[in-house]
Amino acid sequence: MATISRGRIDKRQAILEGAFTVFARLGYAQACVQDIADEAGVAKPTVYNHMTDKATLFRHALEAAARTTLDERLAALEPLSGPGDDLRATLDGVAHELLLLHTDERSCALRRLLYSEITTFPDVLDIVVGSGPHRLNQALAERFARLTLLGRLRATDPDSAAEQFMALLTGPLEARTRMGTSPISDEELRELAEAAVRTFLRAWEAPDTP
């Protein structure tokens, strides 16, 4: 029984990953279920066994992609749990890793799909935000709250501090990459990360921090 359940979960995952790949490549309108089945390596009826129709598949595929990107970003925040003596260096590293993740192929494809299909699927924005940016900001705010308790930050409002930190990162990045359509070098990413951290610490670093 466990083997059957595991196989079903694996097929579902393959279908969701295949669907996201096809939707990212062709867009919603041009993608067909047969393309998705071929990409996932399953029969077309298997796709319908797991998802009732293409629209449902689209929603679930974007939600799964958002959850994957969220897991990667949450892992990138781990150094803030024990930043050591050099908070700026730790924040620089976290910021750089977040920018790398924000510019990877899956993240860029996810944003392009949101931008292109939002009028057809207005509910998808809530699905993706709830599975991604909102939870990332919550996790970042929790870490900033701990740093405040340790006297490292003076973030009287950790939620605002988290929102501002992410805005300092993603705002300039979206402008520099033309909303993810132009490549950016790792050197530029490091420059953006360090500039964001400098500005953030001017506003939020505790005055007696070494």
Image: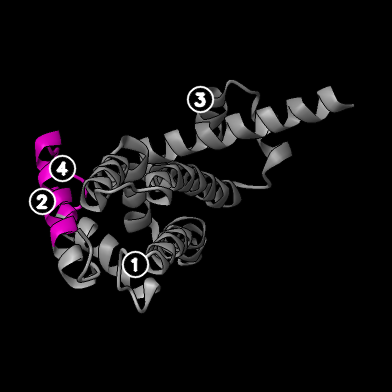
Is mark 1 in CB contact (under 8 Å) with mark 4?
no
Q: Give the range drawn in magenta.
A: 173-198
Q: Mark 4 points at which residue?
A: 189
Between 172 and 200, the one nearer to me in the picture: 200
Q: Earlier in the sequence, mark 4 or mark 3?
A: 3
Q: How far apart are marks 1 and 2 (CA)?
A: 34 Å
Image disc number at residue 176: 2
Q: Earlier in the sequence, mark 3 or mark 2?
A: 3
Residue under the image location 52 percent in, 34 percent down: 17
SS of the residue under disc 3: helix
At label 1, the amino acid type is Gly
Front: mark 4 or 3: 4
Q: Earlier in the sequence, mark 1 or mark 3?
A: 3
Image disc number at residue 39: 3
Q: Does 195 lie within the magenta span?
A: yes
Tell me the crowding category of disc 4: few under 14, some 14 to 19, or many 20 or more residues within 10 angstroms, Cα based: many
Please say if 181 is above or below 135.
above
Tell me the crowding category of disc 2: few under 14, some 14 to 19, or many 20 or more residues within 10 angstroms, Cα based: some
- Identify the image quadrant of residue 168: bottom left
